[in-house]
Amino acid sequence: KRAEKHLQKSSSAWTDEEKLPHYTRVIDCITKFPPQPPMDSHASDLAATAAYRRGLSLERMGNRAAAAQDLFAACSSAPIKAKYAQEACMEVGVWFSRQSESGRARAAFGMAIIRDPLNDRAWSNHGVMNQQMGRFDEALVSYRNAARVQPLTAVNYFNMAKAYQDIGGVRQAIANFRRAVMVQPDYYEAKASLGGALTP
């Protein structure tokens, strides 16, 4: 009950600075006292919602490291169907990626996929992180899933082609560069890569 009241109070606050203490109280009400609520419980949803909103506030205030911590908490602890958690996973995954933390970014995009297996951006980003980590087979699986979910997104085929190039799969790379160009004829990077792959 107290957590719900603080979440309601945060809605009537005007600034991020005014909202932060309410979000913190919601999280403390639920997480500081054992036992921890089950993941799909109302209490868990309240705490994850507060963590998500606090993360967004911290991000707007320029505190990216603390924001990432809260967004990751929302991503990993919210009920499975919570839409805000999907957004939190994507946001924190991108942030970790920009910080060159490929492993943590990969984990965040993996959680986004678990929450929504039809999120082609999550599959694609998951593939990019796998590729950066040298996990080329896993990258190819992710890119194939991205292309299956969204067959009209050229970058999915382009990424797949690049992963095939990394493992010496010249034929497969050429085929996927061609697909990328077929889907998006003005994709100049794919055209240039196709030309390079066709040149002995």
Image (spheres, rainbow, N blue to C red):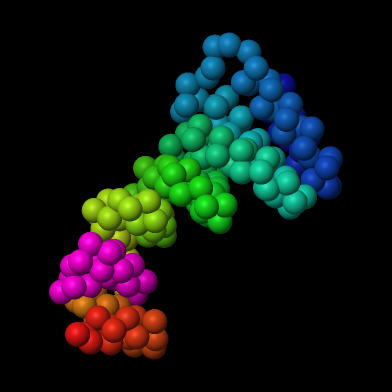
| Residue range of the region highlighted in magenta in the rendering | 153-173
Vertical order, 161 against 136 (above or below) = below
Task: Give the percent coordinates (x, y) of residue 168.
Answer: 20, 66
Q: Quadrant of residue 54?
A: top right
Left or right: 37, with 160 as reference point: right
Q: Residue at x 23, y 87 (%)?
A: 199
Vertical order, 194 against 158 (above or below) = below
Vertical order, 96 against 121 (above or below) = above
Q: Quadrant of residue 32?
A: top right
Examine the residues drawn in magenta and state their main secondary structure: helix
Q: Residue at x 68, y 20 (%)?
A: 29
Vertical order, 119 against 45 (above or below) = below
Q: Quadrant of residue 160?
A: bottom left
Task: Give the percent coordinates (x, y) of residue 77.
Answer: 51, 32
Q: Residue at x 47, y 21 (%)?
A: 38
Task: Give the percent coordinates (x, y) of residue 81.
Answer: 44, 40
Q: Residue at x 57, y 24 (%)?
A: 43
Q: Is residue 118 visible?
A: no
Q: Quadrant of the N terminus?
A: top right
Q: Is residue 152 magenta?
A: no
Left or right: 15, with 100 as reference point: right
Q: Quadrant of the C terminus?
A: bottom left
Closer-to-camera residue (22/129): 129
Q: Is residue 163 visible?
A: yes
Q: Is residue 161 magenta?
A: yes
Closer-to-camera residue (63/164): 164
Left or right: 60, with 143 as reference point: right
Task: Give the percent coordinates (x, y) of residue 89.
Answer: 50, 46
